[in-house]
Image (tube, rainbow, N blue to C red):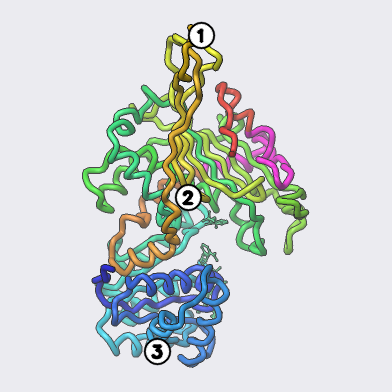
Amino acid sequence: MIIEINEPCDLVIFGAKGDLAKRKLLPALYKLEKSKKIHENTRIIGAGRANWSIQEYRKIVENEIKTFLNEEIEDYIWKKLSTRLYFCNIDVFEKLHFLRLKKILQQKKNIMIYYCAVPPNTLNAIFKGLGDSNLNSLPARIVLEKPLGVCLKTSQKINNQISKYFLESQIFRIDHYLGKESILNLLALRFANSFVFNNWNNQTIDHIQITVSEEVGIEGRWNYFDGMGQMRDMVQNHLLQILTIITMDQPNSITSENIRHKKLNILRALNPININNINIKTVRGQYSSGVIKGNKVPAYLEEHGANKNSQTETFVAVEANINNKKWCGVPFYLRTGKRLACKYSEIVIVFKKIPINLFQNSNLKLLENKLIIRLEPNANIKLNFFNKIPGLDQEYKLDNSQLEYNCFHKKSIDAYERLLLESMRGIQSLFVCRDEVEEAWKWIDPIINAWKQKDSSILQLYMSGTWGPEDSNLLLSRNNHVWHKYN
Ligand SMILES: NC(=O)C1=CN([C@@H]2O[C@H](COP(=O)(O)OP(=O)(O)OC[C@H]3O[C@@H](n4cnc5c(N)ncnc54)[C@H](OP(=O)(O)O)[C@@H]3O)[C@@H](O)[C@H]2O)C=CC1
Ligand SMILES: O=C1O[C@H](COP(=O)(O)O)[C@@H](O)[C@H](O)[C@H]1O
């Protein structure tokens, strides 16, 4: 096995006691330890208001990893990880507490990585605390979680605050979808295959569908989610990132600068959606009670902490259009919702029909070819195409066959595992830059504002366990399209 040669780091996790740290970050660090990707001298320093000793923290982490890791914990790997763990008692609103952190960090000359797994209202105190204690200079890095703000203005505020203390090259903004294997493979699919590369435009592609369907509801996160809604929680980041990766021009190289530049061009070319076209370009819904996989589930308005008048959307479908030479005329249908029939995410590329059908009299109606890219679960790629059924019949008999590539899940890597490693390597390509976040908000804000206006389409209820409101079908049927059926 190749041993990773990244430099020794001090990874400080602000919010070490929180949900994200225990569910995602610590299990991911265990897996990195297992695959020998962490430098011998790297340390992991939990930070938070708890008054834990190092021994207490190590015990707590052991229990959390046992709870949230999806495999048996191996003793020798845990022991190795455990010796890296330290804890720093710090309230980020207490300026002097940063000196405690400084004392720990000064024991080594490691590269500092500050992971902000904390509520948004604590972010500025962290930036300032680190800056005022001189813990921010290069090569220090800082990792920010989504969401970054709730609109362009609030996002700019956070970006302005952090830019007083950190350079853009030090800031790693997470969108965990960018760490998923099947999303990374989109670059290989598009730019390593000539038959794909040469057919990726409005001459050959009729339309593209992107579905991210979730089975979960809001899982006790009412306070967070009700102020957000599915548009901010999922479309502003994950779905727009998928859209940009699937449509960007070929970058000059696979460096963060080049990739980000090409993605930005797409975000800037998105046609605006506002009060003038909101009713034909968007559908929003909220789940009512229903049954998922045989279990009864409550309505959004019956969730714990619910405000009975909430108009927050848990489902969104949008027709996006890109105003450039390559994509003009191609509708991109994005759809995502909570409490839908099942969890899966998929991109469906629907190719244009052949203008003249030689097989009018055949047994099968010639449909469009589709390239179906299943991102999750069990990522795979399928291409459907027509073949002659062998035989002596006078007329052609056709078969609708499928080519299938199926090997992503042989070695499943969690997105956080990859992104933590990339932050240790100091490579930014899988992280989102300031301009991308802000351009995405520029497109999203007018949609959310239009929804608030009187003449805008109303929020539609959909039964949990279905595929969302009926109007989501109407969005496509207006253009003679239909959602590709889940199978
Ligand atoms: N949970 C998840 O799956 C995801 C979360 N995120 C984002 O990650 C961030 C963290 O989320 P989550 O883990 O769920 O939140 P939690 O509320 O579970 O944890 C927040 C942590 O912040 C710490 N904290 C709060 N105030 C202070 C303070 N003054 N000083 C020091 N530490 C403080 C708390 O530590 P203590 O009480 O010990 O001080 C706590 O451990 C949020 O921005 C969220 O939106 C993003 C994607 C997924
Ligand atoms: O960022 C978020 O993503 C999850 C969905 O992530 P996935 O990797 O399970 O597809 C979503 O449930 C959550 O609301 C959102 O904040």
Up-down relation of residue 60 to residue 146 (above or below): below
Which secondary structure, mark 1?
Answer: loop
Disc 1 residue type? Gln
- The image shows residue 24 at horizontal and vertical percentages of 50, 68
Q: Earlier in the sequence, mark 1 or mark 2?
A: 2
Q: Earlier in the sequence, mark 2 or mark 3?
A: 3
Label 2 near ligand 2 (CB < 8 Å): yes
Residues under numbered marks 1 and 2 in contact, where contact means CB atoms less than 8 Å apart:
no
Q: CA distance from mark 1 to mark 2?
A: 42 Å
Taking the view exactly as shown, the residue that stands out farthest to the left is 252
- The image shows residue 212 at horizontal and vertical percentages of 54, 46
Disc 3 residue type? Arg
Q: Residue at x 66, y 55 (%)?
A: 217
How busy is the neighbourhood of tag 3: few (under 14 within 10 Å), some, or many (20 plus)?
Answer: few
Q: Which label is found at residue 278?
A: none
**Figure quadrant of residue 13:** bottom left
Whether residue 437 is in magenta: the answer is no
Which quadrant: the N terminus?
A: bottom left
Which secondary structure, mark 2?
Answer: helix
Q: Residue at x 77, y 57 (%)?
A: 302
Q: Which label is found at residue 360?
A: 1
Q: CA distance from mark 2 to mark 3?
A: 37 Å
Q: Nearer the viewer, residue 365 or 453?
A: 365
Which residue has dot 3 on it? 100
State which region is magenta: 445-472
Q: Residue at x 45, y 82 (%)?
A: 75
**Figure quadrant of residue 283:** top right
Which quadrant: the C terminus?
A: top right
- The image shows residue 379 at horizontal and vertical percentages of 47, 48
Q: Nearer the viewer, residue 463 or 386?
A: 386
